[in-house]
Every structure is written in structure tokens, then in C-alpha cells.
Amino acid sequence: MSGTRTLAITPGRVTALKGLAMLLVAILALILPLIAPDPATTGMAVFTVMYIGLASAWNIMGGYTGYISLGHAAFFGFGAYSFGLMINHLNMAPGYLPFVLVPVAGLLTAALAVGIGWVALRTRAATFVIVTIAFMFMLQLLGENLVKLTGGGAGLALPYSHDWGGDFFNIPYYYAMLALAVLTIGVSWWIRRSKFGLGLLAIRDDEDKALAVGVPTRSFKLTAFVISAVLVGMIGAVYAYYVTYLYPQFAFDPLIGISMVLMAFLGGLGTVSGPVIGALLLEPAQMEFAYRFGASRLYLVFYAAVFLIVILLLPRGIVPSVADLVHSWRRRRQAGPTAGGSRNAPVSAGEEPPATAQQRLASP
Amino acid sequence: MSLLEVKDLSKRFGGVVAVDSCSLSVPAGSITGLIGPNGSGKTTIFNLVTGFIAPDGGEVHFKTRSIAGLGPDRIYALGIGRTFQLARIFPRLTALENMLVPVRRAGLRALLSQGQWGHEKERAMEMLAFMDISQVAGTLGGALSYGQRKLLELAAVMMAGPELVLLDEPAGGVNPALLERIAERIRQLNQQGTTFLLVEHNMGFVMNLCHEVVVVHQGRAIAKGNPREVRENPAVLDAYLGT
């Protein structure tokens, strides 16, 4: 163990570094509207924080259990429309009060998610992916055709506050989105550390084996699915209030569903910080593209390119790849010049030595 | 008294009768071996008892209650654990995490609380040490050797303290030194009160370890008794040598 003391990466220091980085990001997020109050920046911030929440919420189902839902836009749109219909039918005055409807929209989304999950979770793998997409399009069709309820293709208008003019307009929505993103990350972190979360990861690795050691897989999967959907639904509700006008093809937009998946993939599936990093990288880039090339949807080409690069070079995403690099670097430093014999832990008769960092890298 | 009682159990897959009104019992406190030629229905019997497939007919009693038709997680919760052929573990979880996955009698509250973790981790480390694999506690399951996986799978199944453990080929594909260690651990766990039912092709292993042996042939139990009786039974010789 002859690593240079000043440079050694100890687990304690990694944790401290992580904590420091999180604190900095949190402070930056809180004071962002003070540093950059122009609407162009705050507008971009609203959508970036929205996607941090969406990708993190999706990850609770898709990342932890490995059940890839490409139809989470169903819950986004449903939360948006429930919020819009409630605020309109309750004749609520715009302002801060309508934000209390956000959790109500979340509860309604929960009811929908129990129904969809009940059916969709009877399937596994590719079938599950297709069933979730089908449900999303079903809801989009309902949004278009239940004209008396939703306004159909003509859209649904929501009231907005005339007091929040100019530079201030984005600010309340920014903090609402930020609150939901923090809530989502908190829930995700807590699940990751709980026995429930361990059960979800076990389902991802080998569902039948998980059953054999007593994990009630059906109820675990459904619980994760509903938690994930509720968070997405609440974010959809704030989105509705922000954009003030809902159209079925934009609220139930398959691209929203795919974006959150791509962000989680890029950052690292099944990690807490991965979806956050993925959203922080992709959403501003995507908005920049949309801004520069107009509404040509050229950014879709960019998205496809990112997806290909991720699958080819970083199949496990940024966070796990960086973690592996740190691991192997630490091991090499620890091993030092006497790497030969001292590294192996005592091995019992006829057994291979325990895995090294290199083998960890190679494992899926 | 028998801990597990299987009566007239039947299962067919299409035209193939895998298990044909098979009856057998596992005495409490025993190590019982289930032997038979390839394709005789041993693993299907395991899958039926542990709820992975539903029987077409017959009864399975564990202690005093009927468990036929229950799901695998419910059956594990009642106290029957199992291992798989070729050792199945969770490859992307560490060995220690593998140990912490098993859930027994955990209501929602037990799952939501973090309080039990300290205690459970302690027990998991003890069990890993008992299997002589505590040095790989932090290693991902996918990076373990086959022998280590076998030991880890057995260790993890024991975490919830099952009364009966079904082992599917515990000696399959392991070297003689490890084989002896696995046999020794099974014997020790048995002395501490766990009952075992194991499927195995290694006759030396079965004859040394088991108190009682059941022979299955074409989905039926054709003989049972202590190892010596079974070895000398002409019906068993027929089944194995084929006449």
C-alpha cells in the first residue's frame, strides 16, 4: 500500500467531493434566477429542471427494475390535462393557489398508473415496451377525440397570472419544477438505499431468481411503476400551468417519453445522479439546436446521433463508466510497485482469486 | 414426522408426462436425496414444490398446510428456499447485496424501514464467513468464480432462515475440494436444524451425505430408503442401467 498520500482517492474523499459538488449544484440551482434573470435563460432552466425530474422519475421504474417504458408521456400528458381541467372547472384564479392542484393531479395519475401497470406488467421485456407505447397513443387519441372534455385538436386554454409579467413570469414555474425535481431525486435516492430498491435491482438482474428468494415481484414492480408515474404526472401538471395551452400531440408527445429515457441512458441507468447529469447535458443542447435550426426538428437527428454514441461508447452511461475509472485508478495506486503477489486476498483450495478491477470493468 | 409431503403430484407438458402421480415425503431434520436418470422429472418436482409451475393434479403439504398453487415468493415466505442448477445469483449486485435481497415475512413496514439493515448486514457477513467467501463481499456477483457463486447462492438462501431448502445439483460442476466443503456446510446447516432435499447425479456425494434417498423414474417415485437399501434395490438398478 504505497500510494502517494496527497493524491490518494479514498472512499471518504470521494464522498466528500460528491457532497461538495451536490451542494454547489443546489446553491447554483437556487440562485440561478438572480444570476441570470433574462427570460431566455430562465425559460431554458424551467425545461432543464423539468427533464431532470422526468428522467429521474422514469429511472425509478426503467433504471432500477430494467422495465423500459417508452410510454411515460402518457402520465405526463394525463397529469397536464387533469391539472388543466381542474383549474378550469373550479374557476380558480391564476396565481400561486393553483399549485395545490399539482399533488391532486399526481393522485389522479396514480389511479391511471395502477390500471395501466396492472395490465402492462403482465408482460416482460420487449412486450412491455410495446404495451406502454400503445397506452400512450391510446391516451393521445382520447385527448384528440373527447372534444367536449379536452377541446380536442383545438386545444385547452389555461388561465395565467397577468401579475407575473416580463422577467418574472418564468420564476414561479422554475421553483415549482425545481421542488418536484428535488422531491424526485430524494425519492429515487431513498429507494436506491432501501430494501425495496434492492428488490427492484434484483428484479432487473434475474426476476425468477428474485421470486425464489421471496421478493414479491409483482407488487414491487407495480409500486415502482406507480411512484414513477405519479412524479411524472405532477411534473406534467406544472408544465400545463406553465405553457398555458395544451394540445394532445404535444402533451402526449412520444418525444417527451423518449427524451427522458435517453437522458437516463446517457447519465447511467439505475444510478441516482445519472439521469440528472443526462438531463443537464441533453436538454440545453436540444434547446440550443431547436433555437438555431428553428422548428425544423433537426434536433431529432442530433438525438439519434447521441443515442448511437451512447450505445456504442458508453453502453452503461456516464456515471458507471466514470465510477469504474476511479475504481481502477485507485486500485492501481494501492497496488503500487509490488502489484504481483500482495494484491490477492487469501484464496482457498482450488478457487480462482477474487475479481480485480479489470474484471469488474468487463462484467455487464 | 414429515416436513414436506407430496401426494399424487402430476404435471404434463403437452403430450409429455413429466411428473406422473408422484408421492414422496421429506422427514423433518433430514437430508433427503432425490435421484434418477436425466429427464426423470426431478427438477420439475422442484419447480412444482416451489411454485414456479402449477401442478395439474395432486397435493403438496408443508408442515400442516397445503401449498400447491401458491407463488414462489409466498412459498419462500412460508419457509422453503431453493437453489438452481448452475447457480443463479444477481450478477450486477455485490455479494453482500446478494445476501440482503431475500425477503421473508417482511410487511410493507419492514421494507420501508432502514433500521433492520445493520442487523441484517451483520448476519450476512457472518454467513459469508461461514461459507469462507467473506473476502468477496464487495465484489460484483458477475465477477465471482463458479464455485464462489455456488457458495453465495446457498448462503443467500439461508439468510431468511428457511426450514426446508431444496438444492438443485449442489455438486454439479465443482472440483473435489470445493465439493467436500459444500457437503460439510450442508451437514453443519442440517445439524443446526435445516432440512434439505437435494437433486444430485454425483452418487458418492448423495450416498455420503443423505440420510434418505428417493429414486424417481419417468415421473414416479419408484424406491426409497436409506442409501444402502436404495443402492441394492433391483428396480433402481433397472432404471439406471435401462432394461
Image (cartoon, rainbow, N blue to C red):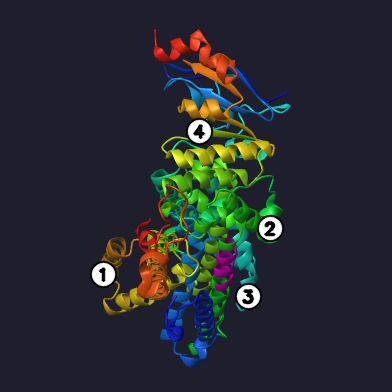
Disc 3 target residue: A93
**Residue at the (35%, 76%) spot, across then down:** A287
Residues beneath discs 1 and 4 located on the same chain: no
Question: Callout 3: 10 Å neighbours few (<14), some, many (20+)?
Answer: few
Q: Which residues are magenta?
A: A182-191
How many angstroms separate mark 2 from mark 4 (CA)?
A: 29 Å
Query: Is circle 4 on the same chain as circle 3?
Result: no
Pinpoint the chain carrying mark 3: A
Asked whether the viewer can see residue B213, the reply is yes
The residue type indicated by label 2 comes to His
Front in this rendered view, residue B28 or A346 = A346
Q: Chain of mark 2?
A: B
Helix, strand or loop at mark 1: loop
Between tags 2 and 3, which lies in front? 2
Q: Secondary structure at mark 3?
A: loop
Q: Amino acid at mark 1?
A: Leu
Report the residue marked by disc 4: B168
Q: Position of residue B90 (x, y in %)?
A: 48, 50
Q: Name the subunit of mark 4.
A: B
Element on which disc 4 rests:
strand
Query: Considering only order in the chain, which callout, 4 or 2, is on the residue closer to the N terminus?
Result: 2
Disc 2 target residue: B119
Q: Is residue A303 above or below residue B243?
A: below
Residue A269 percent coordinates (x, y) = 43, 61
Inspect the image, locate mark 4, and give the three-letter code of the amino acid beneath it: Asp
Closer to the chain start, of discs 1 and 3, is 3
Measure the C-alpha gap from mark 2 to mark 1.
55 Å
Residue B21 appears in the figure = no
* Mark in front: 1 vs 3: 1
Image location (x, y in percent) of residue A323: 42, 69
Which residue is disc 1 drawn over? A298
